[in-house]
Image (cartoon, rainbow, N blue to C red):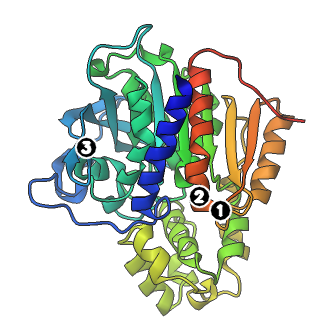
Amino acid sequence: MFSARRRAVSVLAAAALAVAGVIGLAQPIAAADGLPPNPRDDPFYAQPSPFPDVAPGTILDSRKSTVRALAIPLPFQAWQVKYRSTDTHGKPIANVATIMQPLGEAPAGGRKLVSYQTAQDGLTTDCAPSYSLATGLNVPAAELGLMGPLLLAGYTVVTADYEGPESQWAAAINSGHGVLDGIRAAQNFPPAGLNGPATPTALWGYSGGALASSWANELQPDYAPELKFAGVAAGGVPADIDYVARRIDGGPLSGIYLGAAIGLSRAYPEIDTSTLLNEAGKKAFEEVGRTCIAQFAVSHAFRKMSEFVTVPELLDVPAVKKVIAENTMGRFRPGAPIYYYQGVFDELTFAEPVDRLVAKYCSQGVPVQYRKEIGEHGSVAVTGAPGAMAYLNDRLSGKPAPSNCT
């Protein structure tokens, strides 16, 4: 039976990636008439003022939603929930998550939850998962090819706009908190019929979604100790952003370095862009800061960061080095067992830092199943999906977590 599920994952994932090109690299499309407005024009997304004194994960508002693929409604029930989260520096913010369920009665034994983190990868609400799923036109709606099999298997799926209202792309703490509080909101959303923190729960994400999933796993023991995860599956893990930035600077993916710098500067005002950026840099930050990865990965390919800054090497600036250290994985012991899958020829989230991260987790006694796949960043999003779903299914079925730590 589960081999059929694996085949379904491969087929659907291949279709999704054919549309997307690469996770996060498809071109956003404007919403058509009759579809939901962009979050910046939708009062549902507005930040409360004054902000209520409530615990992280508290639901502030909710509404029914429709999940679409290429603007065509899909036969799942769905809701959008606005919930309280916490940004990088401890400030309360309101995030939005989409909760999806298969139609019909709850599966035998009760509902189980998978928190799926999309490769949101953008600096504007055009890239917000809740908006993309409701219109079916923009990335990350293409990742329905991976969420669909989870729903068909009977799982409830939650996916959060984990970058927050300021689209703080690549900001670890902000993203991890957004995921954890989205899980809290889903587990306690009455229409979903889940069992609060006792709900069997797992996480999954690739690339940008792996960043959010992995940080949620590292932050969970301290930030959300009541949550217990059966396991976390992640692929194409951006384990060391300094390593990635130095390797892609000036190459075909250099626009991603620029986009991540913008996202982190929003989360960390100590990165003084007023003095670090030259005129070309200020213009690039303004232009790129209104786009998603589909645009800036193309528009700023083959550019060197030195073209935009007033210092010889941005990554060597003390304030930047401090921010990078705070956003490099391995700071905390993860709370749940892990399945990592990694392309040996990955040209964006390179294998060497993931190797080191896995070794560190193993030394901390974390059960890690680490699988190397023949392929690069885009192809492994497809080829690695069946193994990730099999791992999650086994963990949610109560099977002990395997480990190939040495």
Quadrant of the rendered image containing residue 191: top left
Residue shown at 74%/43% (left/top)? 371
Residue 345 higher or lower than 247, as above or below: above
**The residue tagged with tag 2: helix, strand or loop?**
helix
**97 sits left or right of 306 in the view:** left
- For the residues labelled 3 and 1, the Cα–Cα distance comes to 43 Å
Q: Residue furthest top?
A: 109
Front of the two marks 3 and 1: 1
CA gap between label 2 and label 3 equals 41 Å
Q: Position of residue 199 (x, y in %)?
A: 47, 17
Q: Which residue is mark 1?
A: 376
Residue 91 visible in image = no
Q: Which residue does the numbered mark 3 point to in the structure image?
A: 48
Q: Which residue is mark 2?
A: 379
Secondary structure found at label 1: loop
Taking the spot 32% from the left edge, 66% from the top edge, the residue there is: 28
In contact (CB < 8 Å): disc 1 and disc 2: yes
Comes first in the chain, label 3 or label 1 = 3
In the image, 380 versus 53, the foreground residue is 380
Q: Position of residue 136 (x, y in %)?
A: 27, 52
- Measure how far apart labels 1 and 2 are at the Cα level: 6 Å
- The amino acid at mark 1 is Glu
User: Residue 252's image quarter?
Assistant: bottom right
Amino acid residing under circle 2: Ser
Number of other residues with Cα within 10 Å of mark 3, as a class: few under 14, some 14 to 19, many 20 or more:
few
